[in-house]
Amino acid sequence: MAFERITVNPRQMGGLPCIRGLRIPVATVVGMVADGMTTDEIIADLPDLESADVAEALRYAAEAVRERELPLRRGA
């Protein structure tokens, strides 16, 4: 899967995946969604973003967790 809106630059934001070369990490956008913000609310807070950036950040995050095991707490 190719990501056209996600960039990684070792000299920017410590090499974190960011949106279109901006200093907005994918993790920040995904965290905002996880906190219950809508795409419109995210764009209002980060006006350099476009709705397609938010969608691609979510696709990128989904692909990232698909690639590794994460420790999960077992249910009681």
Image: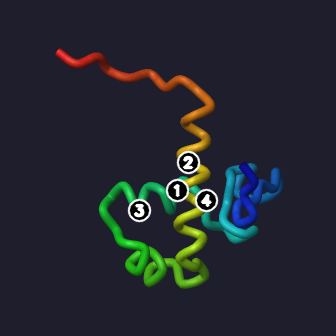
Mark positioned earlier in the residue sequence (2 or 4): 4
Q: Is residue 41 left or right of residue 23?
A: left
Q: Residue at x 82, y 51 (%)?
A: 10
Q: Which residue appears at 53% of the width and 65% of the height?
A: 55
Q: Residue at the location (22% across, 19% down)? A: 75
Percent from the top left, x then y, of residue 58? 52, 56
Marks 1 and 2 in Cβ contact (< 8 Å): yes
Earlier residue among tags 3 and 4: 4
- Occupied quadrant, residue 52: bottom right
Q: Is residue 2 above or below residue 75?
A: below
**Marks 2, 3: nearer the viewer:** 2
| Residue type at tag 4 | Pro
Q: Amino acid at mark 3?
A: Met
| Residue 15 place in picture, x, y as percent | 75, 50
Q: Amino acid at mark 1?
A: Leu
What whole-number distance in Å separates the C-alpha atoms at marks 1 and 2?
5 Å
Give the distance between the C-alpha atoms of the residues marked 2 and 4, in whole angstroms.
11 Å
* First in residue order: circle 2 vs circle 3: 3
Q: Nearer the viewer, mark 4 or mark 1?
A: 1
| Element type at mark 2 | helix
Is label 4 in a helix, a strand or a loop?
Answer: loop
Position of residue 19 measured from the top left corner of the image (x, y, whole percent)? 66, 66
Q: Residues within 10 Å of mark 2 (few under 14, many from 20)?
A: some
Residue assigned mark 3: 32
Q: Which residue is mark 1?
A: 58
> What amino acid is found at the position of numbered circle 2 in the picture?
Ala
Sequence order check, earlier mark of 3 and 1: 3
**Location of mark 2 (residue):** 61
